[in-house]
Image (tube, rainbow, N blue to C red):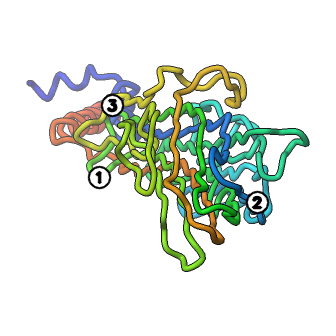
Amino acid sequence: MNISNLKLLPAAAALAMLCAAGSAQAGAYGYSYDNIFGLTITNPTGVVTVASTTNISRSTSTLNGASVIHGGSGTLDSPQAAVGAVTNGENNFTKQGPVGTYARGDAQIVSTQFPPFPPGATSTQAVNVAEAHLDTAGTADASGRNGSTTGFSVNFVVGSPTATLAFNFLADPFMQVFLNNDVGAGSSATANLVVTFSITNAAGATIFNWAPDGVVGSGISGGTESADAANLNTNLSTNFLTRGNLFTYDPTGCGAPTGTGIGTGCGGTFTALTNALVAGAYTLTLNAVESVDLVKVAAVPEPGTLALLGLGLAGLGYASRRRITA
């Protein structure tokens, strides 16, 4: 290539090359959602008496070191934890999508069986979301939590040595992660999903634990499982090597949530029964957590791009000198 030909390169084109090489941006996106509804806890055999109930709902978000935490013990509807360009309102659990730089977490216990809320409720519904997007290099994470320290726990006294507890519910989990093609090495996007039930006795020993994993008979101890529609304890992730691909987790086939995300028209069925419980005091804990974690590293220009940029700058300098001498 004859360097003299660069005098024909318009200055605007050279500047465009500079901008394209030096300021291209890429996105990192993560979304994790779950809607647990129709949850009933019954005792098919024996006598069980509810002693106390604690409901906890909490949401968190962090964007480039700035954090927000809302909710806690005694909260049924945690305010949305939002940082950055959040446009979805509180209790809107649908996707905001990969637009702007933000992190948000939201959690709501819509209804409870223990105690009945709203009055007359006979089942529990808990909805969580965590979502974040990075347009520029940085880090973000978010979580929506209902259950255990982030939901409800029920203490009960078993009045019969042959008492059992039965759990029945539906769930509609959905996750997505994505990294643009031009993110830098070290970039990652991860969405996480956790749902567990556990029963401990007065001595603190766990005598029942259920972590639905999509396989009937697996993920349970101290009881039996008869329906397990999907893995509710899993994650979805992408990194630099798998960039440019949208990954989706939709095991029930319900698709991304619509409306505000609290509908009960679609979900997979989950059912379990404890072994016989001896008389005594117990604590039942439900833990439901959705979270996302993003890291976006700026891409390093490739040698070919740097060479092209250098030629463009050289053309600018040459054209400028020609104008001066003329």
Question: Looking at the image, which residue sits at the far bottom?
Answer: 203
Which kind of residue does numbered mark 1 sit on? Gly
Above or below, comparing residue 269 to residue 136 in the picture: above
User: In the image shown, does 13 or 291 lie closer to the viewer?
Assistant: 291
Asked where in the image residue 172 lies, by quadrant, the reply is: top right
Residue 17 or 3: which is nearer the viewer? 17
Q: Position of residue 57 (x, y in %)?
A: 71, 55
Instruction: Identify which residue is drawn at 29% across, 52% down.
Output: 186
Q: Position of residue 135 (x, y in %)?
A: 49, 41
Which element is circle 1 on? loop
Q: Quadrant of the N terminus?
A: top left
Provide the secondary structure element on which disc 3 rests. helix
Q: Amino acid at mark 3?
A: Met
Circle 2 sits on which residue?
A: 50
Residue 170 position (above or below residue 239): above
For the view shown, which residue lies furthest in the left direction?
1
**Which residue position is annotated with label 1?**
186
Q: Amino acid at mark 2?
A: Val
Q: Total marks drawn? A: 3
- Residue in the image at 36% along x and 24% along y: 13
Q: Which marked residue is nearer to the observer: mark 3 or mark 1?
A: 1
Tell me which residue sits at (13%, 29%) in the image.
3
Look at the picture and state if 88 lies above or below 105. above
Badge 2 density bin: few <14, some 14–19, many ≥20, Cα 10 Å: some
Number of residues whose C-alpha sits closer than 10 Å to that of mark 1, classed few (under 14), some (14–19) or many (20 or more): few
* Residue 13 in sight from this viewpoint: yes
For residue 96, side relative to residue 112 (left or right): left
Report which residue position mark 3 lands on.
Answer: 17
Q: CA distance from mark 1 to mark 2?
A: 50 Å
Q: Earlier in the sequence, mark 2 or mark 3?
A: 3
Mark-to-mark CA distance, 3 and 1: 26 Å
